[in-house]
Amino acid sequence: MPSPLTHIAEHPGKNADITLYLKRDDLLHPSIQGNKWRKLEPVIRFLQQGNFDGMLTFGGPFSNHIHAVAAAGKAFHFPTVAVIRGLSADMSTPTMAYTHACGMQLIPVTKKDYVAGAASTVIQQILTEYPNYYQLPEGGATREAVESCAVISQEIMAQTPGLAPEKRFIAIPAGTGTTAAGVIGGLGDAGTVLVFPAAPHGLSEHSIQSRVEEVFNGVTPHFQIKTEYIFGEFAAFHPELIEFVREFQSQTGILLDPIYTAKMMWGIFELLENGRFPEGSVITAVHTGGLQGWDGFRQRFGIDIYQSSL
């Protein structure tokens, strides 16, 4: 760190003297990519200090988070356990195969028990079986993760100095909103953060604002949530979005992931096309990794763009 910026020369706002960068957090670690590394790094330090015997977390059978936790356990030599949503979940997905190869123990539960969390007797029993494991929420949504992700904004400001706040924009895709909250708090009043949710539920302006206020002493800098680019569902197949990814990779040499960064960049390009940024603006979009998601898309939809390796 810091992760580098790549200048995106071809975009719809170039005639308005607008500069577009992509911050390459996908390059931070070969298997713990992007914001997953940012969120896991403080937890890994806890485990390396000998405070816990391992890590227990939660997610679905295609989860970037589960993939990253398993990779972290393998790379930093601590045991990992994942509670998987759905007794009928496909345990042969590329994500599950990778986590198993990393040595992660997988425990599928019913969706009802998964949603109930600690209120479920099934989940309670699992937690008692791993009493000294660090219990990491789904998506790595912790206070420490928010604080760690604030560094993203600090790096961007150092990499693009001298900008007036009204000309500085940072774009970030969002699942739980943890990374977005960190970026918002880290930027403060030095610009505007654009948050691009990947799903039509589970994230709101209020939820992000509450997280920012909790971690950054009641301060809530300006940010905007762009819900127009969710494409209806979380991880559905949209041919036009896939084609956009292919064209973007052809022009820049950079592969976006199919669930988070693809939607964000599509949204940025459309906002640029519609003249929604002031002339002379500098936009820095954050590539949060998640490329292993293409393995799931290949299995589900037959799309052969990227294939990770164990």
Image (cartoon, grey):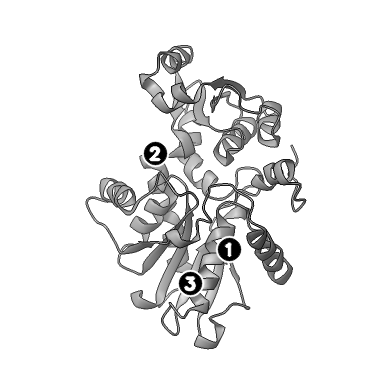
Q: Is residue 287 visible?
A: no
Q: Considering only vertical position in the picture, is 253 above or below 32?
A: below
Instruction: Please name the residue that numbered disc 3 is placed on.
Output: 283
- Secondary-structure class at tag 1: loop
- If the image is split into quadrants, where does the C terminus sit? top right
Q: Spatial distance from mark 2 to mark 3, Cα to Cα?
A: 27 Å
Q: Is residue 169 left or right of residue 233?
A: left
Look at label 3 and name its amino acid: Ile
Residue located 68% across and 42% down the image: 296
Q: Give how far across and how far down residue 127 sits, in percent.
A: 44, 17
Q: Is residue 147 left or right of residue 107?
A: left
Which residue is labeled 1 in the image?
A: 4
Q: Earlier along the polypeptide chain: callout 1 or callout 2?
A: 1
Q: Which mark is residue 39?
A: none
Q: Residue at x 57, y 34 (%)?
A: 66
Q: Position of residue 230 (x, y in %)?
A: 50, 56
Front position among marks 3 and 1: 3
Residue drawn at x 72%, y 46% is 301
Q: Which secondary structure lies at badge 3? A: strand
**Residue 310 left/right relative to 171:** right
Mark 2 lies on residue: 142
Q: Amino acid at mark 1?
A: Pro
Q: Quadrant of residue 183?
A: bottom left
* Badge nearest the viewer, 1 or 2: 2
Q: Looking at the image, which is closer to me, 173 or 55? A: 173
Sequence order check, earlier mark of 2 and 3: 2
Q: Quadrant of the N terminus?
A: bottom right
